[in-house]
Image: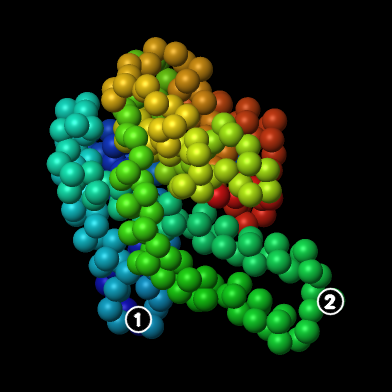
Amino acid sequence: MRDEKVSQHYVPRLHLRRFSTDPDENSVYCYDKQNKRSFPTGVDSTAAEDFFYDGKTELVPEMENFLENLEGRVGTPYEKIVDNQSISCLTEAEKVTIALFLGVQMVRTRGSRSSMRGMVEGIEESIGRENMPEEFKTELDEMKDEESLRELQNNLIKDASSDFANIIAALDWHLFLNETDLPYYTSDFPAVRHNELDFGPYGNLGLRNRGVQIYFPLTPWMLLLIVEPSVYPDLPEVSNTTDRENVVFQRDLQVQRSNRFVYSCRDDFDQAERRIEATPEVAEPLSERANVE
């Protein structure tokens, strides 16, 4: 069994440290939606699982090495955006690196894997196991196996994320500077998609969908918004927001779209608790929800 790179993060520590509660950038406040409690936790120990990408028998942690390389490349452009409060300060190559980072983040999480399992279980439910031939039952059972889901997710990270990056880089990028007293939340599924337009059964959260929006909180006080421009053609590159309702909306997206954990620089999860009280299914893993990204 491999004894290096055992604990593998599905939300990068370089992101979580931006939401730290202390000057050493080593801890954040966490809200567990399933257990309905909040607590401080170390950045090194949260949003991580042992052997999440590379199984115990894999002597070389190939996927973890790939992700560490990407995180090493994205650190400088991430910091440039935050320090300069600007997107135009990025070179084209740096913007593509950020886009790749976001494309990977959309598919690398425990929530993403949970959604994959949910899709297989949805097929079972819609057809009914009693109506399936035995070989199809066996095939579905294998697809739900954690090792099969790991392999599927790893392939998606390597193969699809670059396609996502090209789409994301071509959309319009904007910054929101939060001047309210409410910090942005982040979560175990921090790059969330939203769309005000409804395309019925065809879905509205595809990266090529008209009106799609991608929200990614860079810090408690800065948010990256990436939008399909035909619906939002006149947004400035940088907006200072003093509207608490706007921040409440962004926080609610993190609560609703996360798999289990919400993070903040403060122990201020009243909004998360209200959302779960009003919509209890939000506390369920993504595999058990009807509408998942």
Q: Nearer the viewer, mark 1 or mark 2?
A: 2
How far is mark 1 from mark 2, CA to CA?
Answer: 38 Å
Determine whether 260 is above or below 287 in the image: above
Q: Amino acid at mark 2?
A: Asn
Q: Quadrant of residue 171?
A: top left
Nearer to the camera, 4 or 163: 163
| Residue 152 screen position, x and y as percent | 48, 71
Nearer to the camera, 24 or 271: 271
Q: Residues within 10 Å of mark 2 (few under 14, many from 20)?
A: few
Element under disc 2: helix
Of all residues, the one furthest to the bottom in this rendering is 135
| Residue 203 screen position, x and y as percent | 61, 47
Give left or right: position of 228 versus 99.
right
Q: Amino acid at mark 1?
A: Glu
Determine whether 133 is above or below 255 in the image: below
**Which residue in the protein does label 2 denote?**
131
The structure's colour scheme is rainbow
Give left or right: position of 272 versus 98.
right
Element under disc 1: loop
Q: Quadrant of residue 151?
A: bottom left
Q: Residue at x 62, y 31 (%)?
A: 275
Q: Residues within 10 Å of mark 1 (few under 14, many from 20)?
A: few
Q: Quadrant of the N terminus?
A: bottom left
Q: Residue at x 24, y 57 (%)?
A: 70
Could you tell which of marks 1 and 2 lies nearer the N-terminus? 1
**Which residue in the protein does label 1 denote?**
58
| Residue 158 screen position, x and y as percent | 35, 67
| Residue 157 screen position, x and y as percent | 38, 63
Of all residues, the one furthest to the front in this rendering is 230
